[in-house]
Image (cartoon, rainbow, N blue to C red):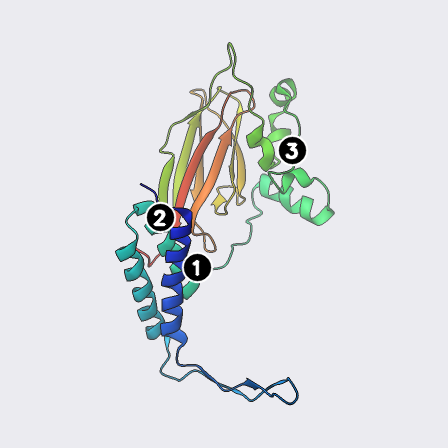
């Protein structure tokens, strides 16, 4: 049974605030408002030298212990633990794109020239899929990343294959590690995977298009990177199939187990 959203938010704030108080309670501000001028005067006494990373670690232990004691739902507890770790110790910086893949290069080109906004956001509709043009020159389609392709599924109907997820829809990954996501679609057709919450695919971007094999299988590698924690929602879609596959990848910072 999931807890009400309000209870989750309150528990998170209480746990993180308790840890923050433990860590920073050594700071003694001496600034005050001068009643005659209304200005802020005085100095702020710096934190005591004893407030070192070990105290920060202790504060994290307090926050995590409180979350573990009060939150019984496993999924909610894991999410709150990740955010507590991020607030107190940080969870890394977003990683730069690797421009070695043609699809990543297409994104860099869009940023540099100010053109092709459909390469930058899933909120911008992708170019319409043309089956004949794709079969005639697949490289033209495959050399470009367009996150919004995940919204181009064909309506369900007679002789329209349905997209099927082949790997678990919810998986965990540590920052710096990768997981494989796979679906089955029409053989020889493109499948696009798009993450809406960070992480990187094998092409170095948050969206990647691959072509299915003769068996209809399409797979991508999704990497948990610094700057990404907790749940990342991912959609997969094929323009010649009906439906979408939805995946949730839970990224953990390395020392949070």
How packed mark 3 is, by other alpha carbons closer than 10 Å (few <14, some 14-19, many 20 or more), is some
How packed mark 2 is, by other alpha carbons closer than 10 Å (few <14, some 14-19, many 20 or more), is some
Q: Which residue is drawn at 51% across and 55% down?
A: 94
Cα separation, mark 2 vs mark 3, equals: 33 Å
The number of numbered discs placed on residues in the rendered structure image is 3
Q: Earlier in the sequence, mark 2 or mark 1?
A: 2
**Is 215 situated above or below 257?**
above
Label 2 or label 1, whichever lies nearer to me, is 2
Screen quadrant of the N terminus: top left
Dot 2 lies on which element?
Answer: helix
231, 134: nearer the viewer = 231
Image spot of residue 172 (x, y percent): 35, 44
Residue 103, visible in the rendered structure: yes
| Quadrant housing residue 133 | top right
**Is 51 situated above or below 228?**
below
34, 54: nearer the viewer = 34
How packed mark 1 is, by other alpha carbons closer than 10 Å (few <14, some 14-19, many 20 or more), is many
Q: Residue at x 36, y 73 (%)?
A: 22
On the image, numbered disc 1 is attached to which residue? 91
Dot 3 lies on which element?
Answer: loop
Task: Tell me whether the residue at label 1 lies in contact with that at label 3, contact meaning CB atoms closer than 8 angstroms.
Answer: no
On the image, numbered disc 3 is attached to which residue? 125
On the image, numbered disc 2 is attached to which residue? 76
- Residue at the limit of the structure toward the left, as seen here: 69
- Residue at the limit of the structure toward the front, as seen here: 35
Image spot of residue 253 (x, y percent): 38, 56
Task: Tell me whether the residue at label 2 lies in contact with that at label 3, contact meaning CB atoms closer than 8 angstroms.
Answer: no
Q: Which residue is drawn at 46% across and 52% down?
A: 228
Residue 252, visible in the rendered structure: no
Q: Earlier in the sequence, mark 1 or mark 3?
A: 1
């Amino acid at each position: 049974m999931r807890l009400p959203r309000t209870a989750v938010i309150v528990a998170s704030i209480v746990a993180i605030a308790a840890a923050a108080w433990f860590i920073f309670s050594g700071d003694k501000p001496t600034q005050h408002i001068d009643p005659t001028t209304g200005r802020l005067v005085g100095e702020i006494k710096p934190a005591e030298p004893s407030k070192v990373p070990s105290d920060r670690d202790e504060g994290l232990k307090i926050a995590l212990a409180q979350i573990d004691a009060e939150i019984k739902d496993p999924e909610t507890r894991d999410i709150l633990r990740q955010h507590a770790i991020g607030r107190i110790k940080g969870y890394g910086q977003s990683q730069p794109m690797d421009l070695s893949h043609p699809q990543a290069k297409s994104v860099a080109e869009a940023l540099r020239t100010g053109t092709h906004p459909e390469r930058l956001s899933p909120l911008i509709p992708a170019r319409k899929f043309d089956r004949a043009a794709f079969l005639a020159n697949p490289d033209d389609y495959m050399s470009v990343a367009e996150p919004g392709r995940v919204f181009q599924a064909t309506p369900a109907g007679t002789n329209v294959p349905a997209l099927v997820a082949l790997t678990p829809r919810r998986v965990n990954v540590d920052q710096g590690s990768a997981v494989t996501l796979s679906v089955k679609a029409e053989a020889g057709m493109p499948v696009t995977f798009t993450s809406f919450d960070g992480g990187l695919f094998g092409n170095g971007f948050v969206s990647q298009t691959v072509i299915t094999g003769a068996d209809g299988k399409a797979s991508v590698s999704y990497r948990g990177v610094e700057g990404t924690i907790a749940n990342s929602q991912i959609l997969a879609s094929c323009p010649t199939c009906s439906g979408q596959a939805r995946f949730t990848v839970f990224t953990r910072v390395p020392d949070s187990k």
